[in-house]
Image: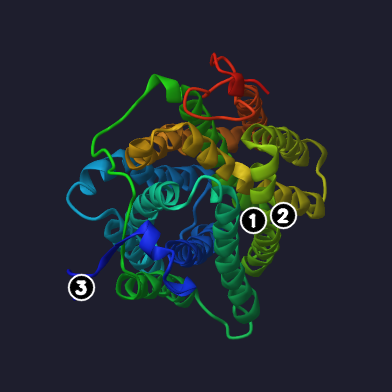
Amino acid sequence: MILNKPEISLAEARALPKWRRPETMLMLLSFATAMTFSTWMAVAANFVIEVVNFDGSDNGWMHTVREIPGFMAFLAIFIVALIREQSFGLISLFLLGLGSALTAEFPTLQGVLVVTFISSLGFHYYETVAQSLQLQWLPKDKAPKVLGWIVSAGAFGALISYGFIIGFWELFDLDYRVVYWASGSVSMIIAAYCWFAFPNFRSDTFQAKRIILKKRYWLYYALVFMGGARRQIFVVFAAFMMVELYGFQLHHIAGLMLVNHLATMISSPFVGRMIAYMGERFTLIVEYVGLILVFVLYAGLYWFKWPWEVAAVLYIIDHILFAMAFAQKTYFQKIASPEDQASSAAVAFTINHIAAVFLPALLGYLWLVDPASVYSLAAAMACISLILAFLVPRHPSEGAETVFSKTPNAYA
């Protein structure tokens, strides 16, 4: 039964009950991934400082190891030539849960690096496949709105995770082992459920099973690269800063992240509508202008010694702005040939992680010297992204990939 699940087309899938449709599966998987990964992120800063005695450099190396599987995402192209893409995604999600569950079992630098690599392997291959399936399964006219709901489902998963930590960490005197096992089990259980509950969905277009790099996608590649480099500063150092600079405890970090994801859960459907009506160009410009301001103010936390309340507000705004980044996906969906979706998703994920492989470790050393300069560098990266955003057409399509394209749609 496991190996011979029924296969149906996307047209046939639309006649299924809502709980068995592709978009429902994508939302459920987004929920599981966010719940497990968000727990890892919420707990990691306190766990590595309090239990494993990390400093800024150790933290940078951990995140460098965490990003190596993202750099290897292009290998997914060859894996999906051997195994169905949908099945590969579910296996990857299960691996994410397993690796996360084992984190507290190895409280040494070497142990943390190994289990981080395992869970990250599952996370990054799942994310690669998920992006590909979203591009293939969602109609172009509905993709922005549905992606908004998928992001919202992920935020809801994170919300439950943080609510659990806040509500039960001190009340029941939980330890890190319980939290990691609980969150990891969620992804393993949901991956197993989706394997049995959903049929195999057949894409309308045969996907190329080779590495594809096309000159006309250059702007998308550039946006993805800069986004990956810039994002590392938030992922690696934002929560770490709250613990190191302001002495936040685990339930404080969890509370801050709960507010973050509550704001994301509410705002993401509206971001989807904004993309649908205002376009990717406008949305990306709003995101990058906001990020420039946020990163400059982050540096100000060290220059002017502002109170923790300012840092918390910036942290929340930062997270909401990053949630707007799925405008990159819908931009690519509009300019790409349908058969390029799967391969390009893997290539884009690798491009996104080129800087991530070395940047956290290097910035970890810079952090030891001057934390404010790390955020100044992030602001400069956001400026480059803003320049690139102005090159996105108002109405992107095949043949209108940038404002330099010689078609009417290319111009704002």
The alpha-carbon separation of the residues under discs 3 and 1 comes to 46 Å
Q: Name the residue under label 3.
A: 2
Q: Pinpoint residue 237: horizontal percent, then vertical percent.
A: 59, 45
* Secondary structure beneath label 3: loop
Percent x, y for residue 216? Answer: 43, 21
Crowding at label 3, few (<14), some or many (≥20) Cα neighbours within 10 Å?
Answer: few
Please give the residue where the numbered disc 2 appears in the rendered image: 246
Question: Residue 259: x, y in percent?
Answer: 70, 63
In the displayed structure image, the side of residue 198 where residue 256 appears, left or right: right
The image quarter in which residue 209 lies? top left
What is the distance, in whole Å, between disc 2 and disc 1 at their CAs?
6 Å
Identify the residue shown where x is 75% and y is 47%: 314
Sequence-wise, the earlier of marks 3 and 1 is 3
Q: How crowded is mark 2: few (under 14 residues within 10 Å), some or many (20 or more)?
A: few
Report which quarter residue 406 is drawn in.
top right
Residue with the most extreme bottom position: 172
Query: Do the residues under discs 2 and 1 have CB atoms within 8 angstroms?
Result: yes
Q: Which-is-in-front pick, marks 3 and 1? A: 3
Q: What residue type is labelled 1?
A: Val
Q: Residues within 10 Å of mark 1 (few under 14, many from 20)?
A: some
Q: Please state which amino acid type lies under the numbered disc 2.
A: Tyr
Q: In this figure, which residue is indicated by the disc labeled 1?
A: 243
The answer to whether residue 241 is seen in the rendering is: no
Q: Indicate left or right for 129 with 322 as reference.
A: left
Residue 50 picture location, percent across and down: 54, 63
